[in-house]
Image (cartoon, rainbow, N blue to C red):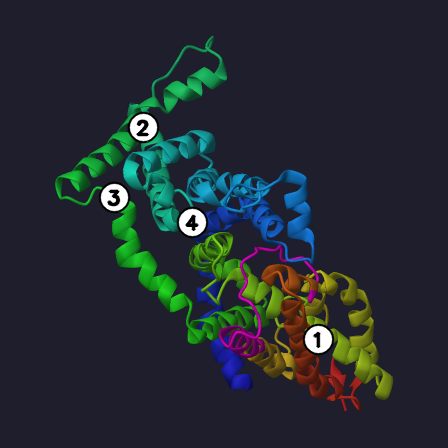
Amino acid sequence: MNKLIDFLEKHLVPIASKFGSQRHLVAIRDGFVAIMPLILIGSLGIMLNQFQFPGYQDLMKSIFGAAADGSPYFHSFGGTLWNGTFGVMSLVLCIALSYNLAKSYNSDSLAAALISFASLIIVYENATFFSFAGTTGLFVAILVAIVSTELFVKLLGNKKLVIKMPDSVPPAVSRSFASLLPAVIVISLFAILKCVLVTVGRPSLHQVVYDVIQAPLQGLAQGLGSAIIVALIIHVLWFFGLHGPNIILPITSALYTPAMEENMKLVQAGGNATNIITSSFFDNFVYLGGSGATLGLLIAIFIASRRRKSALMEQYGAVSKVAFGPGLFNINEPVVFGMPIVLNVRLLIPFLITPIILVLTTYFAMSSGLVPLTYIQTHWTIPPIIGGALATNSIAGGILAAVNLLISIVIYLPFAFMGHDEKVTADGSVSR
Protein backbone atom coordinates (compact mmCIF):
# COMPACT_ATOMS: atom_id res chain seq x y z
CA MET A 1 0.00 0.00 0.00
CA ASN A 2 2.82 2.39 0.89
CA LYS A 3 4.49 1.72 -2.45
CA LEU A 4 1.25 2.52 -4.27
CA ILE A 5 0.81 5.75 -2.32
CA ASP A 6 4.41 6.75 -2.97
CA PHE A 7 3.95 6.07 -6.68
CA LEU A 8 0.76 8.12 -6.86
CA GLU A 9 2.26 10.90 -4.80
CA LYS A 10 5.26 11.05 -7.12
CA HIS A 11 3.46 10.82 -10.46
CA LEU A 12 -0.22 11.74 -9.95
CA VAL A 13 -0.08 14.62 -7.48
CA PRO A 14 2.21 16.88 -9.56
CA ILE A 15 -0.01 16.39 -12.62
CA ALA A 16 -3.18 17.05 -10.63
CA SER A 17 -1.63 20.14 -9.05
CA LYS A 18 -0.71 21.58 -12.44
CA PHE A 19 -4.16 20.69 -13.78
CA GLY A 20 -5.85 22.39 -10.83
CA SER A 21 -3.82 25.58 -11.21
CA GLN A 22 -4.01 25.78 -15.01
CA ARG A 23 -5.02 29.35 -15.86
CA HIS A 24 -7.89 28.58 -18.23
CA LEU A 25 -9.41 25.85 -16.07
CA VAL A 26 -9.25 28.13 -13.04
CA ALA A 27 -11.04 30.84 -15.04
CA ILE A 28 -13.75 28.36 -16.08
CA ARG A 29 -14.16 27.24 -12.49
CA ASP A 30 -14.35 30.80 -11.17
CA GLY A 31 -16.78 31.69 -13.94
CA PHE A 32 -19.18 28.94 -12.88
CA VAL A 33 -18.78 29.92 -9.23
CA ALA A 34 -19.62 33.53 -10.11
CA ILE A 35 -22.90 32.58 -11.80
CA MET A 36 -23.93 30.08 -9.10
CA PRO A 37 -26.45 32.54 -7.59
CA LEU A 38 -28.23 32.66 -10.97
CA ILE A 39 -28.35 28.86 -11.10
CA LEU A 40 -29.88 28.72 -7.64
CA ILE A 41 -32.44 31.44 -8.46
CA GLY A 42 -33.52 29.60 -11.60
CA SER A 43 -33.86 26.38 -9.63
CA LEU A 44 -35.92 28.20 -7.01
CA GLY A 45 -38.34 29.32 -9.70
CA ILE A 46 -38.85 25.75 -10.92
CA MET A 47 -39.22 24.47 -7.36
CA LEU A 48 -41.92 27.04 -6.61
CA ASN A 49 -43.75 26.09 -9.82
CA GLN A 50 -43.57 22.35 -9.27
CA PHE A 51 -43.75 22.12 -5.46
CA GLN A 52 -45.69 18.97 -4.61
CA PHE A 53 -46.89 19.78 -1.09
CA PRO A 54 -50.55 18.67 -0.84
CA GLY A 55 -52.92 21.50 -1.69
CA TYR A 56 -50.16 23.88 -2.78
CA GLN A 57 -51.02 23.93 -6.49
CA ASP A 58 -54.76 24.40 -5.82
CA LEU A 59 -54.03 27.20 -3.35
CA MET A 60 -51.88 29.06 -5.89
CA LYS A 61 -54.54 28.62 -8.58
CA SER A 62 -57.17 30.05 -6.25
CA ILE A 63 -54.98 33.07 -5.54
CA PHE A 64 -53.63 33.83 -9.03
CA GLY A 65 -56.14 32.03 -11.25
CA ALA A 66 -55.52 29.76 -14.23
CA ALA A 67 -55.58 29.98 -18.00
CA ALA A 68 -58.18 28.28 -20.19
CA ASP A 69 -55.97 25.22 -20.56
CA GLY A 70 -55.72 24.88 -16.78
CA SER A 71 -52.13 26.10 -16.45
CA PRO A 72 -51.75 28.29 -13.34
CA TYR A 73 -50.87 31.92 -13.91
CA PHE A 74 -48.39 31.85 -11.03
CA HIS A 75 -46.16 29.57 -13.13
CA SER A 76 -45.15 32.67 -15.04
CA PHE A 77 -43.18 33.77 -11.97
CA GLY A 78 -40.95 30.70 -12.08
CA GLY A 79 -40.77 30.89 -15.86
CA THR A 80 -39.57 34.48 -15.69
CA LEU A 81 -36.87 33.56 -13.18
CA TRP A 82 -35.83 30.76 -15.52
CA ASN A 83 -35.57 33.05 -18.54
CA GLY A 84 -33.28 35.46 -16.68
CA THR A 85 -30.99 32.73 -15.32
CA PHE A 86 -30.78 29.37 -17.06
CA GLY A 87 -32.15 30.92 -20.25
CA VAL A 88 -29.08 33.16 -20.68
CA MET A 89 -26.47 31.11 -18.84
CA SER A 90 -24.09 30.86 -21.80
CA LEU A 91 -24.03 34.62 -22.13
CA VAL A 92 -23.30 35.35 -18.47
CA LEU A 93 -20.74 32.55 -18.24
CA CYS A 94 -18.88 33.97 -21.23
CA ILE A 95 -18.64 37.32 -19.47
CA ALA A 96 -17.64 35.86 -16.09
CA LEU A 97 -15.07 33.49 -17.58
CA SER A 98 -13.46 36.15 -19.75
CA TYR A 99 -13.33 38.59 -16.84
CA ASN A 100 -11.52 36.08 -14.60
CA LEU A 101 -9.13 34.99 -17.35
CA ALA A 102 -8.11 38.56 -18.20
CA LYS A 103 -7.80 39.32 -14.50
CA SER A 104 -5.29 36.47 -14.16
CA TYR A 105 -3.13 38.29 -16.72
CA ASN A 106 -3.57 41.61 -14.85
CA SER A 107 -5.13 42.95 -18.02
CA ASP A 108 -8.25 45.04 -18.64
CA SER A 109 -10.76 42.46 -17.43
CA LEU A 110 -13.89 44.54 -18.03
CA ALA A 111 -12.97 45.31 -21.63
CA ALA A 112 -12.08 41.66 -22.23
CA ALA A 113 -15.45 40.54 -20.87
CA LEU A 114 -17.37 42.96 -23.07
CA ILE A 115 -15.38 41.97 -26.17
CA SER A 116 -15.97 38.27 -25.46
CA PHE A 117 -19.68 38.94 -25.10
CA ALA A 118 -19.78 40.78 -28.42
CA SER A 119 -17.78 38.00 -30.10
CA LEU A 120 -20.19 35.38 -28.79
CA ILE A 121 -23.22 37.29 -30.04
CA ILE A 122 -21.63 37.47 -33.50
CA VAL A 123 -21.36 33.69 -33.91
CA TYR A 124 -24.98 33.08 -32.94
CA GLU A 125 -27.51 32.25 -35.62
CA ASN A 126 -30.68 34.32 -35.24
CA ALA A 127 -33.00 31.37 -35.75
CA THR A 128 -31.41 29.34 -32.95
CA PHE A 129 -30.36 32.10 -30.56
CA PHE A 130 -32.70 31.19 -27.72
CA SER A 131 -31.98 27.48 -28.16
CA PHE A 132 -28.30 28.03 -27.41
CA ALA A 133 -28.40 31.07 -25.10
CA GLY A 134 -28.87 28.72 -22.15
CA THR A 135 -26.77 25.77 -21.03
CA THR A 136 -26.89 24.08 -24.44
CA GLY A 137 -24.47 26.71 -25.70
CA LEU A 138 -21.99 26.45 -22.82
CA PHE A 139 -19.22 24.80 -24.82
CA VAL A 140 -19.19 27.52 -27.46
CA ALA A 141 -19.39 30.21 -24.78
CA ILE A 142 -16.33 28.72 -23.06
CA LEU A 143 -14.38 28.45 -26.33
CA VAL A 144 -15.23 31.97 -27.45
CA ALA A 145 -14.44 33.47 -24.04
CA ILE A 146 -11.02 31.80 -23.91
CA VAL A 147 -10.03 32.52 -27.52
CA SER A 148 -11.24 36.12 -27.56
CA THR A 149 -9.66 36.93 -24.19
CA GLU A 150 -6.31 35.40 -25.14
CA LEU A 151 -6.27 37.38 -28.40
CA PHE A 152 -7.33 40.59 -26.69
CA VAL A 153 -4.74 40.32 -23.90
CA LYS A 154 -1.93 39.65 -26.36
CA LEU A 155 -2.97 42.46 -28.70
CA LEU A 156 -3.39 44.85 -25.80
CA GLY A 157 0.19 44.13 -24.83
CA ASN A 158 1.38 45.37 -28.23
CA LYS A 159 2.28 49.03 -27.75
CA LYS A 160 1.88 49.71 -31.47
CA LEU A 161 -1.85 48.97 -31.17
CA VAL A 162 -2.44 51.19 -28.15
CA ILE A 163 -3.90 54.63 -28.80
CA LYS A 164 -2.45 56.98 -26.18
CA MET A 165 -4.48 59.94 -25.02
CA PRO A 166 -3.23 63.13 -23.34
CA ASP A 167 -2.87 63.09 -19.56
CA SER A 168 -5.77 65.52 -19.27
CA VAL A 169 -8.18 62.86 -20.56
CA PRO A 170 -10.02 60.95 -17.79
CA PRO A 171 -8.53 57.49 -17.07
CA ALA A 172 -11.72 55.64 -18.08
CA VAL A 173 -11.67 57.29 -21.50
CA SER A 174 -7.95 56.56 -21.92
CA ARG A 175 -8.53 52.87 -21.16
CA SER A 176 -11.33 52.71 -23.71
CA PHE A 177 -9.14 54.14 -26.47
CA ALA A 178 -6.22 51.94 -25.44
CA SER A 179 -8.34 48.84 -26.06
CA LEU A 180 -10.04 50.14 -29.21
CA LEU A 181 -7.77 48.63 -31.89
CA PRO A 182 -7.37 45.24 -30.11
CA ALA A 183 -11.15 45.12 -29.73
CA VAL A 184 -11.70 45.89 -33.43
CA ILE A 185 -9.30 43.13 -34.45
CA VAL A 186 -10.78 40.47 -32.14
CA ILE A 187 -14.41 41.19 -32.98
CA SER A 188 -13.60 41.37 -36.70
CA LEU A 189 -11.95 37.93 -36.56
CA PHE A 190 -15.12 36.42 -35.13
CA ALA A 191 -17.14 38.24 -37.79
CA ILE A 192 -14.92 36.62 -40.45
CA LEU A 193 -15.47 33.23 -38.80
CA LYS A 194 -19.21 33.80 -39.01
CA CYS A 195 -18.93 34.66 -42.73
CA VAL A 196 -16.96 31.46 -43.36
CA LEU A 197 -19.58 29.37 -41.57
CA VAL A 198 -22.35 30.93 -43.65
CA THR A 199 -20.35 30.35 -46.84
CA VAL A 200 -19.88 26.62 -46.13
CA GLY A 201 -23.54 26.18 -45.27
CA ARG A 202 -23.13 25.71 -41.49
CA PRO A 203 -24.23 29.11 -40.13
CA SER A 204 -24.67 27.86 -36.58
CA LEU A 205 -21.34 27.29 -34.84
CA HIS A 206 -23.32 26.22 -31.80
CA GLN A 207 -25.05 23.43 -33.69
CA VAL A 208 -21.76 22.18 -35.13
CA VAL A 209 -20.06 22.09 -31.73
CA TYR A 210 -23.13 20.53 -30.11
CA ASP A 211 -23.36 17.73 -32.69
CA VAL A 212 -19.63 16.97 -32.82
CA ILE A 213 -18.48 17.54 -29.21
CA GLN A 214 -21.12 18.38 -26.66
CA ALA A 215 -23.82 15.78 -27.34
CA PRO A 216 -21.40 12.79 -27.37
CA LEU A 217 -19.70 13.96 -24.16
CA GLN A 218 -23.01 14.49 -22.39
CA GLY A 219 -24.10 11.03 -23.47
CA LEU A 220 -20.97 9.51 -21.95
CA ALA A 221 -21.43 11.58 -18.79
CA GLN A 222 -24.80 9.91 -18.14
CA GLY A 223 -23.26 6.46 -17.88
CA LEU A 224 -22.84 4.74 -14.51
CA GLY A 225 -19.18 4.10 -15.27
CA SER A 226 -18.43 7.78 -15.81
CA ALA A 227 -20.11 8.70 -12.51
CA ILE A 228 -17.94 6.15 -10.69
CA ILE A 229 -14.81 7.49 -12.39
CA VAL A 230 -15.69 11.07 -11.39
CA ALA A 231 -16.24 10.02 -7.78
CA LEU A 232 -12.99 8.04 -7.73
CA ILE A 233 -10.89 10.85 -9.21
CA ILE A 234 -12.29 13.43 -6.77
CA HIS A 235 -11.54 11.29 -3.73
CA VAL A 236 -8.10 10.17 -4.85
CA LEU A 237 -7.20 13.85 -5.23
CA TRP A 238 -8.64 14.65 -1.80
CA PHE A 239 -6.58 11.84 -0.25
CA PHE A 240 -3.45 13.70 -1.36
CA GLY A 241 -4.72 17.01 -0.01
CA LEU A 242 -5.95 18.39 -3.34
CA HIS A 243 -9.46 19.86 -3.62
CA GLY A 244 -10.90 17.28 -6.04
CA PRO A 245 -14.29 18.94 -6.72
CA ASN A 246 -12.67 22.29 -7.51
CA ILE A 247 -10.03 20.76 -9.75
CA ILE A 248 -12.50 19.00 -12.05
CA LEU A 249 -15.33 21.55 -11.64
CA PRO A 250 -14.75 23.02 -15.13
CA ILE A 251 -15.42 19.59 -16.64
CA THR A 252 -18.31 18.49 -14.43
CA SER A 253 -20.09 21.85 -14.68
CA ALA A 254 -19.92 21.85 -18.48
CA LEU A 255 -21.39 18.33 -18.58
CA TYR A 256 -23.87 18.24 -15.70
CA THR A 257 -25.35 21.74 -15.84
CA PRO A 258 -26.96 21.14 -19.28
CA ALA A 259 -28.26 17.79 -17.99
CA MET A 260 -29.89 19.57 -15.06
CA GLU A 261 -31.41 22.20 -17.32
CA GLU A 262 -32.87 19.53 -19.59
CA ASN A 263 -34.46 17.82 -16.60
CA MET A 264 -35.93 21.14 -15.48
CA LYS A 265 -37.40 21.83 -18.90
CA LEU A 266 -38.97 18.40 -19.13
CA VAL A 267 -40.58 18.66 -15.70
CA GLN A 268 -41.71 22.22 -16.35
CA ALA A 269 -43.41 21.02 -19.53
CA GLY A 270 -45.28 18.35 -17.59
CA GLY A 271 -42.98 15.45 -18.48
CA ASN A 272 -40.40 13.45 -16.55
CA ALA A 273 -36.70 14.10 -16.10
CA THR A 274 -34.41 11.80 -18.09
CA ASN A 275 -30.85 12.55 -16.95
CA ILE A 276 -29.79 10.60 -13.88
CA ILE A 277 -26.32 12.07 -13.38
CA THR A 278 -26.36 15.75 -12.43
CA SER A 279 -24.49 17.88 -9.95
CA SER A 280 -27.43 17.49 -7.53
CA PHE A 281 -27.04 13.71 -7.87
CA PHE A 282 -23.59 13.98 -6.28
CA ASP A 283 -24.24 16.89 -3.90
CA ASN A 284 -27.33 15.42 -2.25
CA PHE A 285 -26.85 11.66 -2.41
CA VAL A 286 -23.09 11.01 -2.54
CA TYR A 287 -21.30 13.89 -0.79
CA LEU A 288 -23.21 13.56 2.47
CA GLY A 289 -21.31 15.82 4.82
CA GLY A 290 -18.84 16.59 2.06
CA SER A 291 -16.62 14.50 -0.18
CA GLY A 292 -16.31 10.93 1.08
CA ALA A 293 -19.69 11.15 2.84
CA THR A 294 -17.70 12.06 5.95
CA LEU A 295 -20.80 12.80 8.00
CA GLY A 296 -21.10 9.01 8.17
CA LEU A 297 -17.53 8.83 9.45
CA LEU A 298 -18.24 11.34 12.21
CA ILE A 299 -21.33 9.46 13.36
CA ALA A 300 -19.40 6.17 13.21
CA ILE A 301 -16.69 7.67 15.45
CA PHE A 302 -19.33 8.87 17.94
CA ILE A 303 -20.69 5.32 18.08
CA ALA A 304 -17.26 3.73 18.37
CA SER A 305 -16.08 6.14 21.06
CA ARG A 306 -18.95 5.05 23.31
CA ARG A 307 -17.96 1.38 22.96
CA ARG A 308 -14.17 1.58 23.03
CA LYS A 309 -11.81 3.91 24.84
CA SER A 310 -8.29 4.74 23.72
CA ALA A 311 -6.03 7.72 23.23
CA LEU A 312 -6.51 7.50 19.48
CA MET A 313 -10.28 7.34 19.87
CA GLU A 314 -10.17 10.41 22.10
CA GLN A 315 -8.25 12.25 19.38
CA TYR A 316 -10.77 11.22 16.72
CA GLY A 317 -13.64 12.09 19.05
CA ALA A 318 -12.28 15.56 19.73
CA VAL A 319 -11.93 16.29 16.00
CA SER A 320 -15.40 14.86 15.33
CA LYS A 321 -17.05 17.14 17.88
CA VAL A 322 -15.52 20.19 16.21
CA ALA A 323 -16.21 18.94 12.68
CA PHE A 324 -19.80 17.78 13.17
CA GLY A 325 -21.40 21.23 12.95
CA PRO A 326 -19.73 22.18 9.65
CA GLY A 327 -20.29 18.61 8.42
CA LEU A 328 -24.05 19.07 8.68
CA PHE A 329 -23.64 21.72 5.98
CA ASN A 330 -21.27 19.57 3.88
CA ILE A 331 -18.14 21.47 4.94
CA ASN A 332 -15.64 18.75 5.72
CA GLU A 333 -12.20 20.38 5.61
CA PRO A 334 -11.99 19.98 9.43
CA VAL A 335 -12.35 16.21 8.93
CA VAL A 336 -10.14 15.91 5.86
CA PHE A 337 -7.26 17.88 7.35
CA GLY A 338 -7.98 17.53 11.08
CA MET A 339 -8.60 13.80 11.45
CA PRO A 340 -6.75 13.66 9.08
CA ILE A 341 -7.97 11.77 6.05
CA VAL A 342 -5.21 13.21 3.87
CA LEU A 343 -2.50 10.53 3.49
CA ASN A 344 -4.16 8.45 6.24
CA VAL A 345 -3.92 4.86 4.98
CA ARG A 346 -6.27 3.70 7.74
CA LEU A 347 -9.17 5.65 6.19
CA LEU A 348 -8.20 5.36 2.52
CA ILE A 349 -10.35 2.32 1.77
CA PRO A 350 -13.66 3.60 3.23
CA PHE A 351 -12.99 7.10 1.91
CA LEU A 352 -12.74 5.72 -1.65
CA ILE A 353 -15.32 2.94 -1.40
CA THR A 354 -18.14 4.84 0.31
CA PRO A 355 -18.82 7.37 -2.51
CA ILE A 356 -18.67 4.61 -5.12
CA ILE A 357 -21.23 2.53 -3.19
CA LEU A 358 -23.46 5.58 -2.82
CA VAL A 359 -23.20 6.29 -6.57
CA LEU A 360 -24.38 2.72 -7.21
CA THR A 361 -27.30 2.81 -4.75
CA THR A 362 -28.46 6.21 -5.99
CA TYR A 363 -28.13 5.30 -9.65
CA PHE A 364 -30.12 2.08 -9.32
CA ALA A 365 -32.75 3.68 -7.07
CA MET A 366 -33.34 6.37 -9.68
CA SER A 367 -32.99 4.23 -12.81
CA SER A 368 -35.50 1.75 -11.38
CA GLY A 369 -38.04 4.49 -10.71
CA LEU A 370 -38.03 4.13 -6.92
CA VAL A 371 -36.83 7.71 -6.56
CA PRO A 372 -37.49 10.63 -8.95
CA LEU A 373 -34.52 12.06 -10.82
CA THR A 374 -32.98 15.33 -9.66
CA TYR A 375 -34.24 18.41 -11.46
CA ILE A 376 -33.76 21.16 -8.88
CA GLN A 377 -30.30 22.63 -8.32
CA THR A 378 -29.67 23.01 -4.60
CA HIS A 379 -26.75 24.74 -2.95
CA TRP A 380 -24.08 22.31 -1.83
CA THR A 381 -24.40 23.49 1.78
CA ILE A 382 -27.98 22.22 2.14
CA PRO A 383 -27.90 19.59 4.93
CA PRO A 384 -28.13 15.91 3.92
CA ILE A 385 -31.59 14.36 3.64
CA ILE A 386 -33.19 17.81 3.27
CA GLY A 387 -31.17 18.31 0.09
CA GLY A 388 -32.27 14.94 -1.28
CA ALA A 389 -35.93 15.84 -0.79
CA LEU A 390 -35.50 19.29 -2.35
CA ALA A 391 -33.45 18.12 -5.36
CA THR A 392 -36.10 15.56 -6.36
CA ASN A 393 -39.08 17.45 -4.94
CA SER A 394 -40.13 14.24 -3.21
CA ILE A 395 -40.11 12.47 0.15
CA ALA A 396 -38.51 9.51 -1.63
CA GLY A 397 -35.43 11.62 -2.31
CA GLY A 398 -35.06 12.39 1.39
CA ILE A 399 -35.50 8.72 2.27
CA LEU A 400 -32.81 7.68 -0.24
CA ALA A 401 -30.40 10.26 1.20
CA ALA A 402 -31.11 8.92 4.70
CA VAL A 403 -30.49 5.34 3.53
CA ASN A 404 -27.23 6.44 1.90
CA LEU A 405 -26.16 8.14 5.11
CA LEU A 406 -26.87 4.92 7.01
CA ILE A 407 -24.83 2.95 4.45
CA SER A 408 -21.90 5.34 4.91
CA ILE A 409 -22.05 4.87 8.68
CA VAL A 410 -22.04 1.08 8.30
CA ILE A 411 -19.02 1.22 5.95
CA TYR A 412 -17.03 3.56 8.18
CA LEU A 413 -17.90 1.85 11.47
CA PRO A 414 -15.38 -1.06 11.30
CA PHE A 415 -12.62 1.40 10.43
CA ALA A 416 -13.63 3.66 13.30
CA PHE A 417 -13.14 0.70 15.68
CA MET A 418 -9.72 -0.10 14.20
CA GLY A 419 -6.78 0.86 16.36
CA HIS A 420 -8.73 1.17 19.60
CA ASP A 421 -5.78 -0.37 21.44
CA GLU A 422 -3.30 2.09 19.96
CA LYS A 423 -1.77 5.04 21.78
CA VAL A 424 -0.99 8.53 20.61
CA THR A 425 2.54 9.58 21.54
CA ALA A 426 3.59 13.12 22.45
CA ASP A 427 4.61 13.91 18.88
CA GLY A 428 1.19 12.87 17.54
CA SER A 429 2.29 9.51 16.09
CA VAL A 430 0.47 6.27 16.82
CA SER A 431 1.99 3.23 18.52
CA ARG A 432 0.72 -0.01 19.97
Residue name at image x 31 percent, y 28 percent: 182
The image quadrant where one finds the N terminus is: bottom right
- Inspect the image, locate mark 4, and give the three-letter code of the amino acid beneath it: Thr
C-alpha separation, residue under disc 2 versus residue under disc 1: 54 Å
Queried whether the magenta region covers residue 381, the answer comes back as: yes
Describe the element under mark 2 as helix, strand or loop: helix
Q: For mark 2, does the 10 Å Cα neighbourhood hold few (<14), some (14 to 19), or many (20 or more) residues?
A: many
Left/right placement of residue 299 relative to residue 337 reads: right
- Inspect the image, locate mark 2, and give the three-letter code of the amino acid beneath it: Pro
Labelled disc at residue 182: 2
Q: For mark 1, does the 10 Å Cα neighbourhood hold few (<14), some (14 to 19), or many (20 or more) residues?
A: many
C-alpha separation, residue under disc 2 versus residue under disc 3: 25 Å
* Region of the chain picked out in magenta, as a range: 358-385
Residue name at image x 30 percent, y 47 percent: 206
- Inspect the image, locate mark 1, and give the three-letter code of the amino acid beneath it: Gly
Query: Which is more N-terminal, label 4 or label 3?
Result: 4
Labelled disc at residue 296: 1
- Inspect the image, locate mark 3, and give the three-letter code of the amino acid beneath it: Ser
Describe the element under mark 3 as helix, strand or loop: loop
The image quadrant where one finds the C terminus is: bottom right
Queried whether the magenta region covers residue 377, the answer comes back as: yes
Q: Which residue is mark 3?
A: 204
Query: Which is more N-terminal, label 4 or label 2?
Result: 4
Q: Position of residue 79 (x, y in %)?
A: 52, 42
Question: Closest to the observer: 414 or 261?
Answer: 261
